[in-house]
Every structure is written in structure tokens, then in C-alpha cells.
Amino acid sequence: MTFTTPPRHRRRRSKRWWVLTSVLLVVGVGCFAVGLRGHQVSLGLPHQSEHPASPAAASAITAPPLKVVAQSTPVVLSIPAIHVVVAVSELGLNPDGTVQVPTDFQEPGWYRLGPSPGQEGSAVILGHVDSYQGPAVFFNLRSLTAGDLVDVTLADGVVAHFVVTAVAMYPKDQFPAQQVYGSHGHSQLQLVTCGGTFDSQTGHYLSNVVVYSSLVKTTPTTPRPHL
Amino acid sequence: MRTLNSCHVGRRVSPAETGPIPRNAIGQESTRKVGIILVGLLTALWMLMWVALPITQSAPAGASSPAAIDTAPAISQCNPPDFPITAGFQVTCTVTVVNTTTSTGATSSTVTTSACLAAAGVPFPSCPLNSGPVTSSTSSTQLVTSVNQCNGIVTGGGSNVYCNVTVTNNVPVGTSTSAVTVDQCIGSATGGGSTQACAPSGSTTSATVTQCNGSATGGGTYNGETTVGCTVTGAALALPVTVNQCNGTATGGGSAVTCTTTMTNNFITPSTTTTTAPSSTTTATTALSSSTTIPSGVIIPLGAPRTGAGGASQSDNGAWVALGVLALVGAGAAMSVALLRRRVLTGQDGLDRDE
């Protein structure tokens, strides 16, 4: 005796397969899109919420008057706390008056239209927090804390030693350019990168992280041995 | 006894109705099943590529720009294979080049690019198909010598392409210039119902600006826009930059191509604080700071630095991708089964009719 499935039932089963196909298609496309778009990571400061640091707090940087060094181009930046030892390039201004940013995501740049590190005033070194592929040279800058050391080797061989005094994050539309680039009467080094929330619509982060540091000592030029 | 070979094309008969199936018929059946499953899997693979490409394009497109500038002073974007050659897209791409030479001979350039890919009709700056607009701004010590964008893309019809190139040359006063030659809108908008507005006309071989040639040839237009509208502004150029854009693009019917090139020269008087002299071609509006000397006072930059590209937050989420791959492969398999069942049903319907 042979049993055959009624045609209506067979058709219904066939329809079920098409429904399953559609559902899996939608789920697949959705998962793929979500997966490739990635997950939003906010590069905030580990020790404080994303709010502009009060100017008073950021400028309450006490530094003893030190003998500043002569102008010389910085060539190497060293930040032991985040394992950064890297060559430094030079940056100027874009035609629209904004500061240039390094072309190399793994190499920070010194803003050459200000003082060099160790001179009186605020030297500024800018670096990328990440590239299109992943973390860049200043990715861990936000994790620095007061007391961490920052060393800059200058082209003339002098090493300027700085100690971190404050780490702040500012929304880009409230970036305190005068405070970051302007002189506070002694030698400072400001390290600047991006942070906060990444806006995928504009392709930029919404905030900047600024590490303020003050000169604590300079190591004089080491005479090269004569061979 | 009926055999499968005696059935109508595409019709299969169950063993209960036909009795034993010959061995060669079973072989054909297996081959057919394998074929259908293969088609299903290939379809799933195609869907996977279709979903993956537009999303993954965004990062490499932007990422390739900075490296390219340092190694070769040629800018290229919004071309295949990064941008599609199929139908129904809206492409908006811009390149802004600022080349600078100083009286000391130092050179530098700044390039800003923006690339947007959306379905036709989606207004800029919404660019869901490449998660854009994908922008980049890079500086180099080399001068940019060529820009190449929006060529041979979205050729399937029903697309519109907006591409712009702006070149600004900052040069010392007294720098000689050469004429900007044009080769544009040749063999474009040739289909019925097409409209064209190009200025100036020109067909110079190896021209400074080669744009909008052989584009939007499919007839009609997109949403009432001019089928091909292309302009070149600026008659002379102090630093040689060739522009090659919007050629062989949007060749399907119902498409529109709008592309512009603007060439500007700023003649700078050498001094520590430079001034901008009137351009020979277009009035410049930006004042340029000298990049060769360090002034005694600190120059405070405007705005906030842009020192991030989002790579750390755009890292792939492997679990979701793997789940997506599984689901798409499953969809392919389910489609194969559905197709098989449909064929069986079709065959049985035929039998029922025969009987």
C-alpha cells in the first residue's frame, strides 16, 4: 500500500522552505552588516567622565622655574608608562588655519609654529589615537596619570624630561586652543590626540584628549666619543 | 513502463507511481540535485560578497589615501573596484588639493577627499553603502600631480554621479603659469532624451582636464537633471595637476553625471607673514601662513585637531560575521531544498494532469 502526501501539504512544506530561506537571508545580511560595522568603542578617560576639564584644573600646573633649553627640533618621544618610544615629525598649519595632523599614524608630530619641548611656553605634540586599521601611536595616551614621565630627545642631543600633571578631555567644539598652545610662564609639553565617542557619520571622534606635562629637568648633551 | 526520459521537461515522477527507476535515471537525478545545491551555494556566496563589499570598502578606501600620497603624488578614488559598476547608485565624491611651493623651493600639499555611495535618490551626506562619507585629510611634502576619480562606475543605469575636484596652487609671486586645456563631454549624452551642458567645450589631446567623456550615453536622464553637466573653472595653472574624472561613467539609461573642476592660483609674496595676491584665474579667499619660518610668537591653530580615524571602534565583530556567514549559507541550502521541492511538485502536477 502506498501513501502519498496530499499536494496541498507538499505545497505548504515547499512554502515553508521558501520562508526559511527568506528568514535566513534577512538574518544573514543583518548579522553580516552588524559584524562588519563593528562595535562602537568610546575612547574615554579611564579615570573621569567625558566632560571638559575645568580651565582652572588644567592650568593649575605647578612647575618650578627651570632653566629652559635652546630651540631645537624634537626627534624622539618616549613615554615609558605606555611603552611609546617613537620618532617625531613636524607639523604646521593647514590652509584653513587648523593644525596639520601626522600622515603616519604611528608617528606623532611636533607643532613647529610653537616652542620646542623644553623652551618656555607650551610645546605641542600631536598623534593619532587610531588608524583605519586599529590603534595608533597615542591610543593609550588617555591612560596616563599625573606623575608619569615623558621624555623628549631634541636634535641637539638634549633630553627634556617632563612629568604629567593633568589629563583632560574636551569636546572638539570646546577645544581650549589658547590653553593648550599658549604659554603659561614655564616650559610645558602638551600631548594631544582624539578620544571620546567616534562619530561614524563624520568619520571623526567627538573629543580630544590632552595630556599636560611640565618640564622637571633636562639632561645635557652627551658628548659623542671620539673614535 | 514510463521512464523519466519520457516525461515532460522539468517533470519528475515518484517511484510509487512509476515503479523502479532505471540506474541511469537515478544518476541523472543525483546530478541534477548536486547542480541545484551548487547553484544555491553559489547564490549564497554571491549574496555574501554583495553584502560584504560595500561595507568593507569604506575603510580601505580611506585608508589607502594617506599611504598613496607619500609614495605617489596621484590621488585616486571612487573608481572600480572600490565603487560598483552596476545600476541604481548615487555617487558623490570630492577631492580638494592645495599645492604649495615657497620661494625657497620647499613643497607641500594637503589633500582632502570625500567619498559617498548611496542608492540613487538618497540625499548626500547619507552614504549607507560605504558607511560614509569617507573623508580623509592628509599632508605631504610632495606636490600632487594628478587626480583620478569617478571613472567607469555605476554603468548599469538609473544612477547619478556628482564629482568635484578643486585644485589650489599657492606659489611665489612671479611663478609662471600654463594654460588649462580641456577635453570634456565628447561622446556623452548621446541617447534619446538626453540633455547636456558643458563649459568650456574642448577636445584637446592629453588635456589638463579630461572629464565627462563617453558618459551617460544610455538616454533619458535622472529625475529631470541635466544628463551631463560638466564645467571647468580656471584658465591657467601654476603647478601642473591633471584631472581625469567622470569618463565612461553612468552609461546606462536614466542616469545623470555632474562633474566640476576648479583650478585656482594664489601668488604669495615671500615674507614671514604672507599676503595673498589676486589670482590670475579665480579670487582666493584664504590667507596662507608661511611654512618655512618659525615666527617669534606662537600661532594658535584654529579648531580642534583631527587625530583619529575610528579604526579602533570599527574593528570587526567576528561572532556576528560568522553568524551571518552561517545564516547565508543556510539560506542557500534552504533555497536549494525549496527549488528541489518545487521541481518535484511541478512534476507531480504534470502527472496529475496526465492522469
Image (spheres, coloured by chain):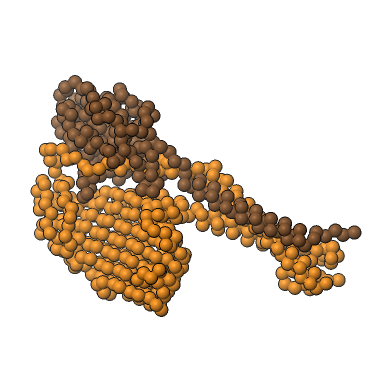
Chain colours: A brown, B orange
> Residue at the location (10% across, 59% down)?
B174
Report x, y in % for residue B35.
Answer: 67, 62
Report x, y in % for residue A101.
Answer: 28, 43
Q: Is residue B104 left or right of residue B149?
A: left
Report x, y in % for residue B253.
Answer: 44, 72
Establish if A74 lies above or below B278. above
> Residue at the location (84% across, 63% down)?
B16
Of residue B340 and residue B4, the one placed in the foreground of this image is B340
Of the 4 image quadrants, the one containing the N terminus of chain A is bottom right
User: Which of the 4 image quadrants contains residue A214?
Assistant: top left
Q: How many marks?
A: 0
Q: Residue A65: in sight, yes or no? A: yes
Report x, y in % for residue B278.
Answer: 12, 59
Q: Is residue B178 left or right of residue A175?
A: left
> Residue at the location (27% across, 68% down)?
B231
User: Which of the 4 image quadrants contains residue B238?
Assistant: bottom left
Of residue B130 and residue A71, the one placed in the foreground of this image is B130
Residue at far right of view: A1
Establish if B339 lies above or below A124. below
Residue at far top of view: A64
Of the 4 image quadrants, the one containing the C terminus of chain A is top left
> Residue at the location (28% across, 53% down)?
B111
Q: Is residue B27 left or right of residue B117?
A: right
Q: Residue B152: in sight, yes or no? A: no
